[in-house]
Image (spheres, rainbow, N blue to C red):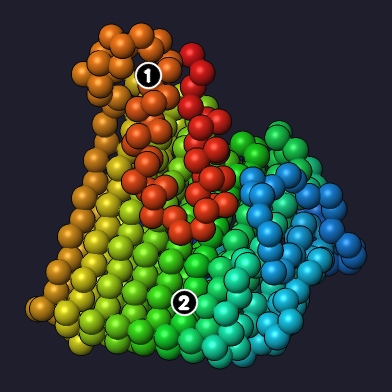
C-alpha cells in the first residue's frame, strides 16, 4: 500500500477533523485482513497530547550499549536533545518544515492521527559530504500510564553524506498501557548512505502503529534494520522508493513474539528508476499464542528497467498455538527485471532436535541452539556491531528456557 503524499497544508483542526472522518480499519480491508483492532480505542489514551509540559519523563532502559554522536530522548512530556554533533542539524522538528508530509500524508487512518496530534519531532539534516563515525541515537519512551505518544522523525541525508541513525521504542514499565503512533520520513539523496535502525521493544500492553517511508536517490544507499519484540498489537508500514538510477535499499527484519502478541509488518518496494536494487529479508520466531503477519509487495514501474528486487519472510513456530501469515506479492510493469520472493512457515526440525539431544543436550538447550541458527543469517546482514549484539541478546532472552 502506498501512502498518499502531501497535497497542500492543512491546519491542526482540519487534520483532526479529517482523521475523525476516516473510517477505522477493519478486517474487511485487504491490508488489515489479519489484524483485528477490536478493543482499541484511540480516544481512551490522552495524557501528554496538549504539549503543555516541558522536559521528558524518565525513559526506559536501552537495549543498546554504544558511543554516539548525538542523543535525543522523547516521551509524552517532550523531547530533550542531550547531545548534538557539530555541523549537523539535530534539532526539534518545526511543523512548518517544507518537506514534512512529503512522503507520509494523512489519507491512512493512523498517519492522519499522527499528522493531527504530533507535538514532539526531530529533524536530522546531514550536509553534503559529511561523514559521521558514530551513530545518532533517539530513544522514544512511553512513560505515562494510559498515555499516547505521537512521534515524528524527518531525516535528510544530503549528497555524499554518510551516517547511522538508531531509533529505539520502549516503555518505562513492563505492564504500561499506552498508544504509540510514529511516522518517519527519510530522504537519502544522490550518492549518500544512511544506516537506519528502528527497534521496537514496547510493553505488551501498548498498541503501536508506525509509518516509515524512505526515498532513495541516484546511486544512494539505504541500509535499514527493523527489530520487533514488544507491543500488544498494531501495524508497521515500511516503504522504500528507489527513485534515482542506481539506488539501493536493503531492509533486514527480525522479530520474536510471545504470549498473546500480534505483530503486523506491511512492506513496499517501489522501483521508479532504472538499475535499482532492493533486498528485503524478514525472519521471526513465534511462541505461545502469538501471531505475526507480513505482507510484502514489489512494484516495478514501466521505466524501471534492469531492476533487481528480492523479498523473503521466514517464520519458525515454537508452539503449536502460534500463527504466521506471510503474503508476498509482485507487480511488474517493466520487461527487463529480476524479481523474486520467498516465504516459509515451519516448526523446529525434528531431525535437528534428535541430533542435538543425542549428543547430550536437553530439549530446551537443543531448541535454543536451533533458534540461534535460524536467525544467524539475518543477524549477519547487520553492519553495526552494537545493533547486531543487541538484537542477538534480545532474541536470546526470548527463547523459552524450558
Image quadrant holding the N terminus, namely: bottom left
Residue projecting furthest to the left:
335
Q: Position of residue 92 (x, y in %)?
A: 75, 76
Left or right: residue 305 versus residue 112 is left
Residue 368 to residue 162: above or below? above
Say whether residue 376 is left or right of residue 41. left
Q: Which mark is residue 193?
A: 2
- Sort mark 1 into few (<14), some (14-19) or many (20+) by Cα contacts within 10 Å: many
Residue 101 x, y percent position in the rendering:
56, 80
Q: Is disc 1 placed on a helix, strand or loop?
A: helix
Residue 63: quarter of image: top right
Disc nearer the start of the sequence (1/2): 2
Q: Could you tell me if residue 385 is visible in this image?
A: yes
**Residue at the image point whose x is 64% and y is 49% from the top:** 64
Decide: is 230 above or below 267. Answer: above
Q: Secondary structure at mark 2?
A: strand
Q: Going 69% across and 63% down the picture, which residue do you hit? A: 68
Measure how far apart labels 1 and 2 are at the Cα level.
40 Å
Left or right of residue 371: residue 278: left
**Relative to the observer, which residue lies in front, 259 or 384?**
384
Quadrant assignment, res 54: bottom right
Q: Which residue is mark 1?
A: 366
Q: Position of residue 205 (x, y in %)?
A: 64, 38
Q: Foreground residue, 210 or 250?
A: 250
Q: Nearer the viewer, residue 281 or 12?
A: 281
* Residue at horizontal 51 percent and vertical 32 percent from the top: 396
Q: Where is residue 224 drawn, in percent x and y? A: 45, 63
Amino acid at each position: 500500500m502506498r501512502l498518499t503524499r502531501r497535497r497542500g497544508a492543512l491546519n491542526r483542526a482540519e487534520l483532526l477533523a479529517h482523521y475523525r472522518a476516516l473510517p477505522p480499519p477493519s478486517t474487511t480491508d485487504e491490508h488489515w485482513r489479519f489484524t483485528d483492532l477490536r478493543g482499541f480505542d484511540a480516544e481512551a489514551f490522552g495524557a501528554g497530547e496538549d504539549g503543555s509540559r516541558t522536559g521528558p519523563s524518565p525513559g526506559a532502559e536501552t537495549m543498546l550499549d554504544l558511543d554516539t554522536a548525538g542523543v535525543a530522548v522523547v516521551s509524552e512530556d517532550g523531547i530533550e536533545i542531550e547531545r548534538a554533533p557539530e555541523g549537523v542539524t539535530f534539532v526539534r522538528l518545526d511543523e512548518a518544515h517544507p518537506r514534512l508530509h512529503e512522503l507520509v500524508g494523512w489519507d491512512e487512518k493512523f498517519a492522519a492521527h499522527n499528522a493531527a496530534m504530533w507535538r514532539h519531532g526531530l529533524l536530522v539534516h546531514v550536509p553534503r559530504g559529511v561523514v559521521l563515525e558514530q551513530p545518532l541515537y533517539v530513544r522514544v519512551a512511553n512513560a505515562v500510564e494510559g498515555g499516547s505518544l505521537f512521534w515524528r522523525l524527518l531525516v535528510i541525508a544530503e549528497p555524499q553524506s554518510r551516517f547511522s541513525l538508531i531509533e529505539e521504542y520502549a516503555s518505562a514499565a513492563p505492564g504500561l498501557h499506552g498508544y504509540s503512533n510514529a511516522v518517519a520520513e527519510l530522504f537519502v539523496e544522490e550518492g549518500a548512505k544512511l544506516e537506519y535502525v528502528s527497534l521496537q521493544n514496547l510493553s505488551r500492553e501498548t498498541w503501536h502503529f508506525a509509518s516509515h517511508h524512505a526515498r532513495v536517490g541516484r546511486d544512494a544507499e539505504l541500509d535499514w534494520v527493523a527489530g520487533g519484540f514488544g507491543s500488544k498489537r498494531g501495524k508497521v508500514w515500511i516503504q522504500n522508493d528507489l527513485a534515482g538510477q542506481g539506488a539501493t535499499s536493503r531492509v533486514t527484519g527480525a522479530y520474536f513474539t510471545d504470549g498473546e502478541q500480534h505483530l503486523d509488518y506491511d512492506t513496499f518496494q517501489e522501483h521508479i528508476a532504472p538499475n535499482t536494487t532492493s533486498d528485503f529479508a524478514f525472519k521471526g520466531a513465534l511462541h505461545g499464542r502469538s501471531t505475526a503477519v507480513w505482507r510484502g509487495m514489489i512494484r516495478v514501474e514501466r521505466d524501471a528497467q534492469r531492476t533487481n528486487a528480492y523479498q523473503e519472510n521466514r517464520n519458525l513456530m515454537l508452539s503449536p498455538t502460534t500463527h504466521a501469515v506471510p503474503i508476498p506479492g509482485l507487480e511488474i510493469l517493466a520487461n527487463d527485471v529480476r524479481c523474486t520472493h520467498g516465504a516459509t512457515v515451519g516448526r523446529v526440525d525434528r531431525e535437528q532436535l534428535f541430533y542435538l539431544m543425542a549428543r547430550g543436550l536437553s530439549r530446551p538447550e537443543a531448541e535454543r541452539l536451533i533458534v540461534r541458527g535460524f536467525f544467524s543469517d539475518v543477524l549477519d546482514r547487520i553492519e553495526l556491531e552494537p545493533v547486531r549484539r543487541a538484537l542477538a541478546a534480545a532474541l536470546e532472552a526470548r527463547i523459552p528456557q524450558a
